[in-house]
Amino acid sequence: MAQDTGARPAEPAIARANQEVRRRLPFDDERDFEDARRGFLGTAAENIVRDAEGRTVWDLDAYGFLAGDCPSTANPSLWRQGGLCADHGLFEVTEGIYQVRGFDLSNMTLVEGQRGVFVIDPLLCAETAAAGLALYRAHRADRPVTGVLYTHSHVDHFGGVRGVLTEEDIERGVPVLAPEGFLEHAVSENVYAGTAMARRAAYMYGAALAKGERGQIGAGLGQTTATGVVGLIPPNVHITRTGQTETVDGVRMVFQLTPGTEAPAELNVHFPDRAALCMAENATHNLHNLLTLRGAQVRDPRVWARYLTEAVDLFADTSEVAFASHHWPVWGRERIVAFLSEQRDLYAYLHDQTLRMLNQGLTALEIAERMELPPALERAWHTRGYYGSVSHNTKAVYQRYLGWFDGNPAHLWEHPPAEAARRYVDFMGGAAQVLRRARQSFAEGDFRWVAQVVNHVVFADPENGEARALQADALEQLGYGSENGTWRNFYLTGAHELRHGPVGTPTKTNSPDLLAALTLEQLFDALAIRVDGPGSRDADIVVRWRIRDGEAVTMRLRNGVLTHGTGSGAAAAEPDLEIGLDEAELRGVLLGVLGPDDLAAREGVEVSGDLGRLTELLGHLVEPDPDFAVVTP
């Protein structure tokens, strides 16, 4: 774990701003604390969750410091949210429904059936999921897992499945339910842009930061990401329409599909026999992301709002509790309706007002500065920007409709960051002059400007120690003042890397299970993404794969593009090489497990042509960099 060596105290301007937050928000409203503790049955006796090698993947007591008074180095609103999210243990939601909370970024829900227990969203990794299941069994009974539901396609809601299902369970076909399109989105998100997303997630969740008042205090949606083994068992029951009903082990469920909301494939589920409504991640106790800072496809707040209205119409009259896969439940019909309606209004307002302003000619940055929520939404704790933010969500709406370009031709062909930085610094009188004036701005509490200006010096001369130190100090102060957990983590991780070097990617999601779930189409696409285009412009290589019990696939590297297909249009030339093999062997080649020499020596593989052409083609692939620079060029 990286230490917070070099962290400075809060500057007076940040301390004053944080104190103003305490004055402005209703801290005397403690209903959330009552709800978060309601139904508590107990927690694990052992506070450390370890992997097979004894490495810590989760520490239940890491956030115990949040029980103390909020220091000047933290936004009091985020401190409050962190304390609520850090509360860990097994909680009874309603009769027969339980949640394990505080064992990972997400919650695991357990619904008791006729003979076993049905698991909803088995956390991010096997180790924390197994610990959560053991906690449930310690307090209830040693019930077998009789079914699993993935509410949506993000890894913290399926990655721990092998901690609750055994190989024997899989072989006997235990039902695994998921919304239509789940598998495609679950695996593609973690492969196509997976390396960049995972590196940025290191900033977003601050997993490498020391926990403490000058370090990581949470991520708003939960505390951070566990670092254990990520798995995936493909679903065998698909939810394809709203109103679809399924019964598993006597547990009756009615589903509402909500594609394009918080995830491309997502659903809500009602338990009519328990008067309980699971909102997946569509309604949690914070403003969610329309475009997560780690990167993703922009979500659609218009349909998000519409599906929340639909959930109220479908289920509110017959629900006494609403719970989600993060945070704590809401009890009582009136409170459920108010909660879901305010969440609906939150996304609808951001969508509609961003469109109103962009149609008046305002840019994304201008809209983000002007956007203010209505008073009722501004003061509701569950609409606060702990994970998403009003600022970056309005920019996401702008991006969804108009893209990156703001229409100003001066921004159409700007220099890239390092090249522009050298020019800026030269125009501003050189690094020494910029740093002198930036220190003055720092002393005046204008940390936002310091970070913007000194970034030019760092990108013009990344070895400038004074610039790195001042930039780190400015980012740190911005982190101390952030109500948004992911903003704080981004700022503080940036400060840490400027002072101590890269932290890398603590949580990796490209596990063997996820790679095995890729279709051949996705594997070929993933290979094409790795082609060194400039280095392969003159190459023209055609390889045909003759798959036993399948169609032949021809791939061609030409003009720096790797294409593939099964028809005659896949290649306009005869293959340089034909290889007969089974699909498992082809997957081995595409995943880099088998090389050309392995194929030549493998019994049953038929090779016709020059195997060296495959070696040449694979030589044009480049490996992604999981440690690429973020706060330096």
Image (cartoon, rainbow, N blue to C red):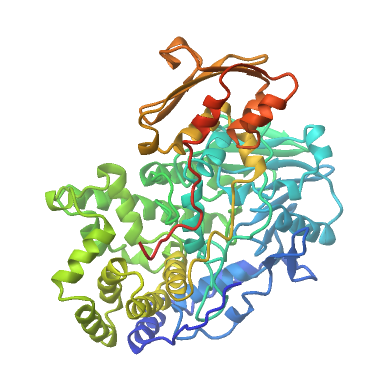
The quarter of the rendered structure image containing the N terminus is bottom right
Q: Residue at x 65, y 53 (%)?
A: 123
**Relative vertical location of residue 561 with respect to residue 392 in this rendering, above or below:** above
- The reply, left or right, for residue 50 in relation to residue 35 is right
Q: Is residue 31 visible from the viewing direction of this image?
A: no
Residue 241 lies in what quarter of the image? top right
Residue 354: percent from the left, percent from the top? 26, 52
Q: Nearer the viewer, residue 584 or 397?
A: 584
Residue 581 lies in what quarter of the image? top right
Q: Nearer the viewer, residue 419 or 49?
A: 419
**Relative vertical location of residue 446 with respect to residue 132 in this rendering, above or below:** below
Q: Residue at x 40, y 13 (%)?
A: 572
Residue 310: percent from the left, percent from the top? 46, 41
- The reply, left or right, for residue 207 in relation to residue 373 is right
**Relative vertical location of residue 243 with respect to residue 565 in this rendering, above or below:** below
Q: Residue at x 36, y 76 (%)?
A: 468
Residue 599 lies in what quarter of the image? top right
**Relative vertical location of residue 567 with respect to residue 320 in this rendering, above or below:** above
Residue 19: percent from the left, percent from the top? 39, 85
Outermost residue toward the right in this view: 142
The quarter of the rendered structure image containing the C terminus is bottom left
Q: Is residue 231 visible from the viewing direction of this image?
A: yes
Residue 494: percent from the left, percent from the top? 43, 69
Q: How many marks?
A: 0
- The reply, left or right, for residue 83 in relation to residue 258 is right
